[in-house]
Amino acid sequence: MTKSPPVIELSWRDENYGSVCAVAAFRNYAGTLDWSDRTHQRFRGCLKRAGFAFHDGRCSYIATSGTREDRQRALCDELARAGERRKQIAAARVLIDKGKALLDEARDMLETVKDDEQAARENLPPSLEDSERAQAMDAAVSELESAISALEDFDADEIGTNLDTASE
């Protein structure tokens, strides 16, 4: 499920008056009401890492240290990195989906091998039913069943849900 990235519109302002000493300030006028709590949390993390904090009295995000240009660049860089992380998650999701298809193919191959081994074991002559070869065949079938079970435990859907949540 591909989601469109959140739209962020920064309106840089001069908030350096009164009791506030701001080197850089902005208001985000973009519609953030449809953002999930996780997206808001990630956005606030970007702001914090770039040196901004929300000022309730001014209804603006304000940075009080550094230079205006440094803070603006830091915020833009931080937001760009957040977008890159979302792209990396999407790329990982594609690889996981491809891996799931390969694992399904491998599981089908192992099912065939297991079925063939079971059939060969069942067709052993009575004189070989208790032989080392028969025991090896039984062990091979058991190990193949364990391998198939492990492949079935891979849950690409759960991983996809986790990645969708992570990319919000």
Image (cartoon, rainbow, N blue to C red):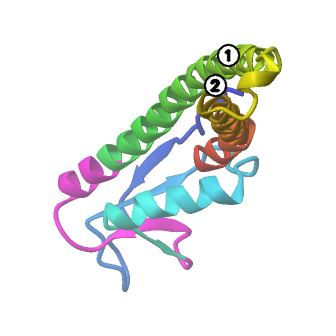
- Establish if 108 lies above or below 161: above
- What residue does disc 2 label? 100
Query: Who's the residue at 71% across and 19% down the image?
Result: 117
Local crowd size for mark 2, using a 10 Å CA cut-off: few (<14), some (14–19), many (≥20): some
In this rendering, is residue 29 above or below 94? below
Q: Amino acid at mark 2?
A: Lys
Q: Is residue 47 left or right of residue 112?
A: left
Q: Which disc, if any, is residue 67?
A: none
Of residues 150 and 69, the one nearer the viewer is: 150
Q: How dense is the environment of label 1, judged by Cα within 10 Å: few (below 14), some, or many (20 and up)?
A: some
* Pick the front one: 112 or 56: 112
| Distance between mark 2 and mark 1 Cα atoms | 20 Å
Task: Answer left or right for 66 relative to 154.
Answer: left
Question: In the visual, does 58 lie left or right of 84?
Answer: right
Q: Residue at x 58, y 43 (%)?
A: 167
Residue topped by disc 1 = 113
Tag count in the figure? 2
Task: Specify whether residue 55 is painted magenta.
Answer: no
View extreme (bottom): residue: 19
Q: Earlier in the sequence, mark 2 or mark 1?
A: 2
From the top left corner, tell me how far across and down residue 88 is, in percent.
Answer: 44, 34
Which region is colored magenta? 56-75
Mark 2 against mark 1, which lies toward the viewer? 1
Q: Are marks 2 and 1 in contact (CB under 8 Å)?
A: no
Image height of 27 relative to 106, above or below? below
| Residue 111 image offset from top left, x and y in percent | 73, 20
Q: Position of residue 52 (x, y in %)?
A: 38, 67
Q: Provide residue 55's location: percent of width, then percent of height.
A: 49, 75
